[in-house]
Every structure is written in C-alpha cells, then in structure tokens.
Amino acid sequence: MEFDALLLSRLQFAFTIAFHILFPAFTIGLAAFLAVLEGLWLWTKRDAFKTLYLFWVKIFALSFGMGVVSGVVLSYQLGTNWSEFIRLTGGVIGPLLAYEVLTAFFLEASFLGVMLFGWKKVGPRLHFLATVLVAVGTTISAFWILSANSWMQTPAGFEIMADGRFEATDYWQVIFNPSFPSRLVHMLLAAFITTGLVVGAASAWRVLKERAVTGWSESRIALAMAVGLIAVVAPLQLLAGHWSGEVAHKLQPSKTAAIEGYWETRADQPLHLFGIPDREAQKNHWQVSIPGIGNAIQNVPKDEVILGLDAWPREDQPPPAIPFFAFRIMVGLGLLMIALGGVGAVLLWRRRLFESRWFLRFCVAMGPSGFIAVLAGWMVTEVGRQPWVVYGVLRTRDAVSPVTAGEVATSLLAYVVVYSIVFTAGALFILRLMAEGPVAALAEPAPRQDRAPGSPLAKAPEDTTPGEDL
Amino acid sequence: MLDLPLIWAALIAVAVLLYVVLDGFDLGIGILFPFARSKEERDVMMNTVAPVWDGNETWLVLGGGGLLAAFPLAYSVLMPALYLPVLLMLAGLILRGVAFEFRFRARNRGRKFWTQMFAGGSTLTAAAQGLILGGFIQGVAVEGDRFAGGAFDWLTPYTLLVAAGIVAGYALLGGAWLMMKTTDNLHGDARRWTLTSAAAVAVLLAAVSLATLFVHPQIAERWGLEAGSGLTIDWAALAPLLAIPALGLAGLLLVVSMASKGSHRWPFVGALTVFLSGYLGLAVSFMPDIVPYGIGFREAAAPDNALGLMLVGTGFILPLILGYTAWVYWVFRGKVTPETGYH
C-alpha cells in the first residue's frame, strides 16, 4: 500500500466525515426531542418539561457547534481533495449541495441563535417556533445530503458528455434516485434511535443515582420517553435496513456480495455468520455459516443465482473485510437496541422500569451504541461502493485532486490533532453535564436579572466565578 | 433568455461580500480578544456575536457551495491551488467556532485555553483568508482544466501583505461593531481599537492597492496604467475608476472622524464602506475572470439546466433568508452589557 495523495485523501475524508456524522446523527434527533419537550411544556405547563428542555439544549448547543465546524470542513474538502470529482460531476450534484445550504443551513444557523439566546427576547410561542424550525432544518439537511450520497451509490438521470463531464438529463431522477428513499428513512431512524439511546443512558444514569424518589422526576420522564421511542423505532429500523439491503442487492450487487462474504456466484447461497474475508485468497477463513437460508435473507427464491465477488475482476471488487465486519456490528447492535426497547416497554408497562437496576445499567451501557452503529453502517455503504466514487461510472482514483502527498499528509495530521482536542473537550463537557443531570446543572447561581415581562423562561446563567480573570 | 452564468457570478459575488463583512466583524472580535481588560469584557464581546456568528459563517458555506454548484471548474481549480491556506482557514474556524460554547463551559485553565483558541483561531482564519485572497489575485497555474502549480505558490511577500491587510480590516470591523454594541469602558476601548485598526488599514490598504497594480499586467491595464517605457496613464480608463479608492478614503475618514467623536453607529458604516470599496476594486480588476488569469466565469459555469434549477429555488429562498436574518439581528438589537448574560 503506497501512501500517495489518493490513499491519504481517502483516509482524511473517512476521518473527517466519520467525526462529522456523529453530530448530525445526534442533533437531528435531539432537535426533534427539544421541539417535543418545548411543545409539551407549552401545552401542559409542567415545569419538568421546561427543566428538561433547558438541560438538553445545553448539550444540543455543544453538539451542534461541533457539527457546524466539522461540516464546513467537508464543504471545502470536496474541492481541496476531490476536485476532479467536482469538476466532472459538479453540474449534477452541485445543485443538491447548494440547496442544502439554502434550505437548511441558514434556517438552522439563524434560528439556533434565537433558540439558545432568545428566551428573554421573544415570546414563548415564537421561541417554540424557532426550536421547531431548527429541527425542520436538520431534517431538510439530511434530505439533501443523503440525496447527493445516494446518487453516488445509484446514479440516475444524467449523461456523460464527450469531455467526460456529467450533465443532468432529469433532476427529479437525480434527486429521487433509486437508493435515496430507503437510505433517507434508514438514516433518519438511525438519528432518532441514536438520540434516544443517549437520552436514555444519561437519564438512566441519573435514575440510578436517585435516592428515595417517588413519582416522576425529570430523569424518569426523559427515560420513559427514550424507552418508548426506541421500542417503536428500533423494530422499524430493522425493516428500513432490510429495505436498504434489497435496493443494494438489486443495484449494487458487488456491495451485497462483500457484505455477505459471498465469493462464489451461485444459487442457494448460505448465510455466513462469521468469517475472515481474504482478498488475496478470494475466500473466507474461519467461516461459520448456515447453509440454505442466504437467498431467503435477500428475499429472493432459493434457485435464483446471487452474484459472488468472483463475478467481478479483482480491480472492480470492493475491499470485502470492512463491509463484512461493519455490517455484523451494525446488525448485532441493532438487535440489542430492539431488545432494549422491548424489555424497557414491558418494564414501563409493569411500572418496574425505574427499579430494575440491571436494566438501567444496560441502558447506560447502550448509550454510545447508536453512534457505533451509525459509523458501522456508513462504513458498509461507503466502503461497499468502492472502487467507485460514483458507482459503476467514476472510479475513486480518477476523482482525486492534483495535490501532493505531502500536502495531504500535512492536512490529515492537522485534522487529527485539531479534532482530537475539540472532540475530547466537547465530549468532556457533555459528559460532565450529563453526570450532573438536569436539576443540578440548572440549579447554579440564581438569575442575576429580572425576567422580561411576557417571557416566563429565563436561561439560567453559567457557573461564572466572580473575580476570576482568565 | 436569462444570462444564467452572469446572474450566478453576481449572486456568488454578493454572497462572498456578505460573508466578508458579516463574519469579518465577528472574526474581528476574536482578533481584538487579547486586548480586552478582563474576563467580563471578553464575555460581553463574545455575547455581542454569539447569537449571530453561526448564521454569518453560513455565507462562507454558501460561497463555497455556490461556487461548487455554479462554477464547478473554478472550484475544482482554486481549491487544490489554495490547499494549505484553506486548511489553515478551516483549522482556525474549527477552533474559534467551538470556543463560543466551550469557553462558557470550561473552568479555570480550560477557559484560559479556549480564550486563546478563540483569539488565535479568529486571527488564523483572517490571515488564511488573506492568503487565499492574495493567492487568488496573483493568479493560479492551470493546464488542461486542472491546477498545475506547486504546493506553495500562494506564499509570497504579496500574499503576506494581503493577509496583514485582512487581519487589520477585520479588526476594524470588529472594533466598530463593538462601538455599536457596547457601553462604558468597553465602548471606550473599542474606540481606541477602531482608531488603531483604521490607521493600520489605511497604510495596508494603500500598500496592497499599489502592489496589486504590479501583480499582473491585466490589472494595471484595467486601471489605465501601462509600465512600458516609463509609466503611461490612460486617463479615460482611470478617471471613472477613481471613484472606488475615493469611496474607500471616504469610509476611512468617516471611521476616524466619527470614532473620535465617540459615535456609536457611524464607525461601523464607515468600516463597511471601506470593505465595499476594496471589493469593488477587485471586481473591476478581474471581471470576467473567475480563475485569474484566463478562465472566465462563462467557461467555468455549470450547464444551464443546473444553473436554472438553482435559480428557481434561490429566487424564493434567498429573500426569505435575508428576511429572517434581518429579523434575528433585529431581535438581538441594542447594547449588550454584562447583565445581558445570554449564557
């Protein structure tokens, strides 16, 4: 393996986008959660919802900030590292990215200011509207970026001109390309589950720390909401994931072959539970399989032929190990999430949710699992697309910028250093807030100023120690 | 039939100008951060922009995303050419962007660290944008629609001069913004900062303007100057353009006279005028090049169907964006004091 500009650019893109995706995956769901909390507060006037809102909005602000800055990097990195990709396909996917900025980024960024700092400036209804618009913005953003990504997976509605540039023939087909609907649903559900798991873990942690609480504390409310959400959405995600898999089977068969560890093209494929795919030997080592059910899993008749990687010359095969393992990690975690939702719902129903300490600990342990599953899922879909940047049409190696390995090595190193600092600090602040819990985190010094008439909410001030000159 | 490439060139030019003045003042606040007297002053300085910085920065994403979508060829040549300064800019933007929240969350040493990151990141961003601008003005080596230069083409005495100019210019915007948004001692400090940066801007703007005339014959020619055997001046070309430096000079005079009087709003108007003049000066020098020197905006434009599709949406959405952006500024209008305590 040679560390040329191509490989380094791939590593850098993988690193920066993996870092970035953690934040949207969390903030899409969290924005919706905040909108629900504020709506419930306006509707029921119960202070607990307000307390929960004010607590989670702090965590939202931290996560959103990190999402914004790591997102700006991506919008420029397409040009610095993948300029040939943009030169050739910019006329097709450019408008999708431009529409993301116009319809989502401005909406989110502008109303975020009102959401975070506008308590004393606008009335409660207008503030609620700001929260809703931020939540809508995050979802619109997912719409466009997943459309662009899906087009790279299953390109449609374009033609290639004599000079190699792509032009759209039908933007409707570009935007609503075949893998877009399933991918959008799969990602949005993933975002909701990820948020549910984080909220559930943080709340379960607080419930574990509670002493002699009767009735509904803030953390109990949030935990019940999270468990309820996961109980409904995690099983749906299984269906959405299966839908995505079917689309891949039809339109990106080399990806399916890599995911399933199929080297041989044949009817009546087995299901490989485990194995170590070996590209050199073109087979799996240590294979553990169930014969006879692979076709059923793909939803095709037993006698239908399913392509194995041997259907492609080696240079057209995706690297098999990453999709194979990442897929199993994602599915395994998904099954655990379904279990969490199911068991939690039963416990809630039987009014034993807050006393079952083993379950609360399970919730805490599952806190990061959504992030891991999202990352694993993206590795499946992106590595499974290789060696293509636009599946079947444009190779990744033909998309890279005319820059030197030295430049890319420098930037990769810089991003690793900067992101390590930012991520460590951000994670620390978020975990510290979570450990304190909603009540303690908001119970710091009393408000220093009067609340404006007509605005029943005032953002609690921070822990500013007077006399400290830093 | 609409001239779509021309409309998009104009739209992106406006987006970039909006970015420069909007993010310019909040980056300027970071540049001025080390000069503040106390933590409380820095808190107020940050709070004057905390609700709007994110929206301001979105214009940068629109500038980049718009260039990508409307002029993919220009984007794909310029970005690799300016690889390292773009990296510096992004690193700066990350560190100063997270500092808004992190600085308020951190305690003691952590707060000190994120104070430095906000100041350092903002200054780095401004300087990197100066290097990008300088590298752009110098021109970019192109062969067969691809960047064909070296990794450090952008690093010359000229680009360093431009970088210094941008840092001073953003400090001026930041100082004038603070005069408008603060009271008491901080307002007094802001006045001092505004006057100092105005002096720096006057010197650097003059130096950059003169140096730019010698960067490429095309620019000198636009301004009616020809340095063949002795300097010949084509007054017919130069005379109407003199309005542009005159506008810049007027802006600077407005800043200095009004800041001296302690006016709250006029220095900011003056600072905006200075930036407008610099921007117009560049526009005149380059039109119709989008990658100096040689690739025109028409040649770099995306197919008409792409430009048309985007224009339809933009026609509806851009007025909406401008509307709610203005509303957000209106919501957060007025002075920010230590008691405002957003955080």
Image (cartoon, coloured by chain):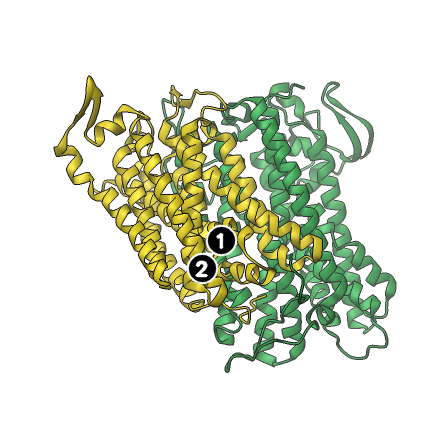
Chain colours: A green, B yellow
Mark 2, residue position:
B178
Q: Give amino acid for label 1.
A: Ile
Q: Give amino acid for label 2.
A: Leu
Residue at the extreme top: B229
Q: Nearer the viewer, residue A433 or A340?
A: A433
Q: Is residue A384 visible?
A: no
Q: Quadrant of residue B166?
A: top left
Residue contact at pointers 1 and 2, CB within 8 angstroms: yes
How far apart are the two marked residues, 1 and 2, measured between alpha carbons?
A: 8 Å
Secondary structure, mark 1, is: helix
Q: Which mark is residue A93?
A: none
A19 lies left or right of A224? left
A189 above or below A166? Answer: below
Question: Where is residue A278 shown, x and y percent of the image?
Answer: 75, 23
Question: Where is residue B295 shown, x and y percent of the image?
Answer: 32, 27
Q: Quadrant of the C terminus of chain A?
A: bottom right
Q: Quadrant of the N terminus of chain A?
A: top right
What residue appears at the point 60 percent right and 22 percent down from the top-left corner? A316
Q: If you read the primary sequence from the N terminus, does the residue marked by circle 1 or circle 2 appear first? A: 1
Q: Quadrant of residue B156?
A: top left
A405 lies left or right of A349? left
Q: Which mark is residue B29?
A: 1
A51 above or below A321? Answer: below
What residue appears at the point 52 percent right and 78 percent down from the top-left corner? A455
